[in-house]
Amino acid sequence: AYESDPSGCTGAVAAFNREVDVEVASALASEYLECIVASEFSGEALTLLRAKRDVRLVRLPSLLAFAKENEMKTVSGGVLIQDKDIPQALSQPKIVTQRKPNDLENAAMEIAWRVAKHAKTHAAVLATPLQTLGIAGGQVTRLDAIRLAVVKSQERHPVVTPNSPRVIASDGPLTQLEVREAAKIGVVGLIQPGGSSDDKEAISAADDLGLSMVFTGRRHFRL
């Protein structure tokens, strides 16, 4: 997470779904952070982090314990109520292309899809099996999101080893134009919700280019 955008770390919030130990605390100690949230802090980590000025340490035992089934957003003249996008494991994603993703591609897709949930629509996430490379959110089109994710990745990750396949996750359905744009920078797999009138053309483009593509059957949508 840090390496995907180190310049954006200044004044940010760091959140963990596990205990922060002294090793992690040492890495955070050199950064200016507004808040650090974790399920727990070790005693040594607390001693180290409490020495930092103006940082808030928050213990949150379970993030999911605070998740509600619905969320509300105010709009002009009323309220919008929609189902909450609660984190879910990819139980049975549907492979729609002739080429199936291998284990490394599946791992990369899992990471990218989880991260895409937290980026504002339209969003695209470029990732390898071990880390995110570029995150783009809040774009006018998904094509813009893909292009921005690529640009952000190239600023910090110009070289990717052959055994680290790159994939893209899109929070919404893709067209063939976006599939072809992703292929230009060496993406080997895509994960997206599917369910669009453009699905057939997108699948055909992926097959033409030798890419793997997975449909989740569930889209992310974050305003």
Image (cartoon, helix red, strand yellow):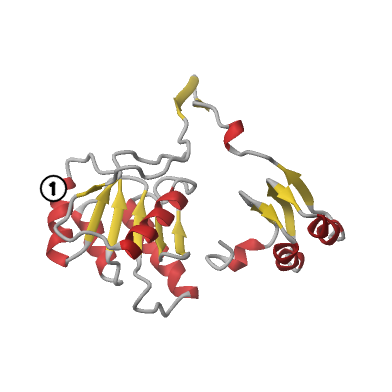
Q: Quadrant of the N terminus?
A: bottom right
- The percent position of residue 30, horizontal first and vertical second, equals 75, 69
Instruction: Pick the residue in front: 45 or 121.
Output: 45
User: Visible in this render: residue 138?
Assistant: no
Q: Residue at x 45, y 45 (%)?
A: 117
What residue would you read off at disc 1?
A: 200
Q: Amino acid at mark 1?
A: Lys
Kindly indicate the quadrant of the structure image that contains residue 99: bottom left
- In terms of secondary structure, where does tag 1 sit? helix
Kindly indicate the quadrant of the structure image that contains residue 104: bottom left
User: Visible in this render: residue 11?
Assistant: yes
- The percent position of residue 177, horizontal first and vertical second, equals 21, 58
- The percent position of residue 168, horizontal first and vertical second, equals 34, 59
Number of labelled discs?
1
Q: Residue at x 61, y 32 (%)?
A: 66
Instruction: Pick the residue in front: 201 or 148.
Output: 201
- The percent position of residue 85, horizontal first and vertical second, equals 45, 36
Q: How packed is label 1: few (under 14 Cα within 10 Å), some, or many (20 or more)?
A: some
Q: Is residue 201 left or right of residue 150?
A: left
Residue 62 against residue 215 in the figure, above or below: above
Q: Residue at x 29, y 39 (%)?
A: 217
Kindly indicate the quadrant of the structure image that contains residue 48: bottom right
Q: Residue at x 49, y 24 (%)?
A: 76
Q: Is residue 180 left or right of residue 10?
A: left
